[in-house]
Amino acid sequence: MSRDDEQLTADERRVRESLGRLPPVGADPAFRERLRRRFVSGGIGPARSPRRWIAAALAASLAAAIGASLAVGNRGATWKVTATSGAGVVTIDGRPFDLARVPDVTVAAGARVTTDAQAELLIQSADTMTLVVTPATTVRLPATPGRWFGRRVGATLERGELRGLTGRRFAGATLDIVVPDARVEISGTTFAVFRNEEGSCACVLDGTVAMHDRTGSFRVAPGRRRVVPPGGVPPRDEPIRSMEAMKLEMLRDQIDPGRASGASR
Amino acid sequence: MPSDVDLERVRARDPSALEGFFDAFFDRTYGLIFRLTGSHATAEDLTQDTFLKIHGALDTLDPARDPWPWVATIATNVCRDHWDAASSRLHARSRSLDDDPILAAELLDGRPGPADTARTNEEATLVQEALGKVPEPARLVVLLHDWQGLRHDEIAQMTGQSHAAVRQQYHRALATLGKLLEVLKP
């Protein structure tokens, strides 16, 4: 009940009491759970109104015909595991796979991937993105950007390290990687994002990323990294560590040797 | 507001903090939207839109303040956008349920809550029906005040109106509801 000290008439007080007796409203548990999952993963999208059925059905039929052709043309590449290293188990959407059997497996956009302490995956989406899911990492994979729309995609890194490289077809798109202490915005670069006991970090080999954390938004320049420690410790901007730089260079040279000349995408 | 929700981490979109935030505000948000619209189908759509907007606006969340007025502002703005987009339906809604059997069915299609007695159910249905006939923004004001427990000054801040205007709308809403409840009483 409100803390306002109202001078109400008896009738007004009766109405107010009726309102106060309205019971809590329960939502459909399945809807609640679905929305909760999407809110937490960042995969939440605008609702579609289910009302005005007939008009909506007609509009939907027309839109479907147009949309189907657009969607087919717009569809981004799928993720495919193209290489592995180490040994152990990889869990994809709750299903465990022996690392030796994972190559060539197609992985859905939005899949939650967890690697064992010894297992590493190289996954690619044609000429759009390459990601290395390093050992002991849990990540929800992004969708791949559409050709014309849906060019902003998101991933969630819960723990571990993700190294990546954007490809020719990524140009103009944006990848947001949400880590526990920040959001890393990538628009064409060779990068690593990790989350460990040090905090959340974005390392940049070439190109530029933006990092949004509790202290604001910052540009992370090539050859630099920004670390956001948990708790109240101030973030720091510092040179990328030589080991990390070497790993990123190896990835870049393996996937896109031409980029070593310094051109970023 | 549960003390274990760290708003700094919510701002940074930390998944575990987002879970806590969602759990803390989903029921209140859904409940408010349902009471404003009277339809579970619409409430699901608009609650989803609300949490979409919340996710996009987390950078503007002030960790030093109780987030509920912020959340409720977003929810009510989503409802207003919905009503603006369907202004003809809003007009019908503010006239009479008897003129709009579809709307009447919508208002009454609420899945039963955990009512203690048949009398409580009957009263809740009656009050919900009457609420559906109170014009905006008075319906919003009276719900936020008497069902959600917000103060007039908080509602004034949320809706961009003066404190006096909100108080006036509140008293008008109570008067309208009083008459409607008398008329609708079986």
Image (cartoon, rainbow, N blue to C red):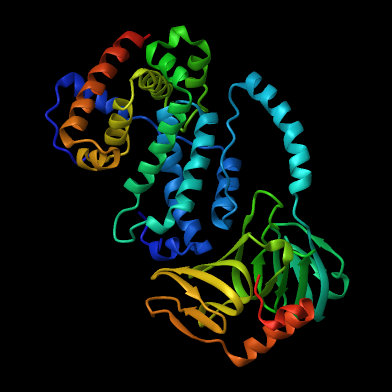
Quarter holding residue A82: bottom right
Q: In this view, does A88 lie above or below B57?
A: below
Q: Is residue B156 above or below residue B84?
A: below
Q: In which quarter of the image is residue A13?
A: top left
Place of residue B155 in the rendered image (x, y in percent of width and height, measured from the top left):
26, 39
Foreground of the two, A41 or A17: A41
Left or right: residue A28 compared with residue A73: left
Q: A40 left or right of B152?
A: right
The answer to whether residue A19 is seen in the rendering is yes
Residue B49 or A6: which is nearer the viewer? B49
Whether residue A24 can be seen here: no
Task: Tell whether A110 sits left or right of B67.
Answer: right
- Left-right relation of A115 to B68: right
Task: Give coordinates of residue B86: x percent, y percent.
Answer: 48, 23
Number of labelled discs? 0
Identified at 60% across, 29% down, the residue is: A50
The residue at the point 74 percent across, 34 percent down is: A66
In what quadrant of the picture does the C terminus of chain A appear? bottom right
The answer to whether residue B5 is above or below residue B115 is below
Please name the residue shown 38% across and 8% down the image: B186
Residue in the image at 67% along x and 89% along y = A246
State the image coordinates of residue A133 (x, y, percent, origin top left).
71, 74
| Front position in the image: B172 or A162 | A162
Vertical arrangement, residue A125 with respect to residue A246, above or below: above
Q: Where is residue A73 in the image (x, y as percent from the top left)?
A: 78, 46
Residue farthest to the left, as pictured: A7
User: Which residue is at the far bottom?
Assistant: A242
Split into 4 quadrants, where in the image is the N terminus of chain A? top left
